[in-house]
Image (cartoon, grey):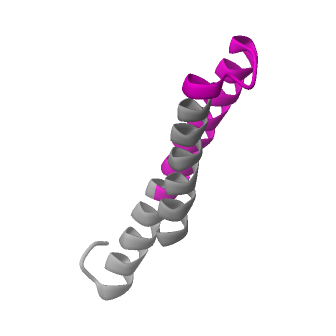
Amino acid sequence: MKLGSIICLVLFVAAAGLFLVQMWFSPMSAEVFVKILISLVVLFVVALGIALVKKEYVDEKEMKDSGYID
């Protein structure tokens, strides 16, 4: 979960930084900006989903190994 959190944080900060740079300086066209921003959002959601599923799997495996669930 730690790696997933770091990846999500980096993607979030990158999207926020890109947004601020585009808002103040407009270094790229609106079309390219939207494509990059949507790509960052999709990567964020995928990384978060993978991290949550992995955490759930590891927690369930630990509970089975400890005998709490069958």
Q: Residue furthest bottom?
A: 66
Expressed as whole percent of the image width and height from the top left, the position of residue 66 reads 31, 87
Q: Residue furthest front?
A: 25
Q: In percent of the image, x 59 and y 45: which residue is there?
A: 14
Classify residue 7 as left or right of residue 31: left
Expressed as whole percent of the image width and height from the top left, the position of residue 28 reads 75, 22
Expressed as whole percent of the image width and height from the top left, the position of residue 31 reads 72, 12
Toward which corner of the image does residue 67 lie, by quadrant?
Answer: bottom left
What range is drawn magenta here?
Answer: 22-51
Total numbered labels placed on residues in the image: 0
Q: In percent of the image, x 62 and y 41: which residue is there?
A: 43
Q: Is residue 37 magenta?
A: yes
Q: In percent of the image, x 38 and y 80: which residue is there?
A: 62
Choose between 55 and 24: the one closer to the eye. 24
Magenta stretch, overall SS: helix
Choose between 23 and 34: the one closer to the eye. 23
Q: Is residue 46 magenta?
A: yes
Locate the C terminus by quadrant.
bottom left
Looking at the image, residue 49 lies above or below residue 29: below
Q: In percent of the image, x 49 and y 55: which residue is there?
A: 9
Looking at the image, residue 15 lies above or below residue 61: above
Classify residue 55 as left or right of residue 14: left
Expressed as whole percent of the image width and height from the top left, the position of residue 13 reads 52, 48
Q: Residue furthest left?
A: 68
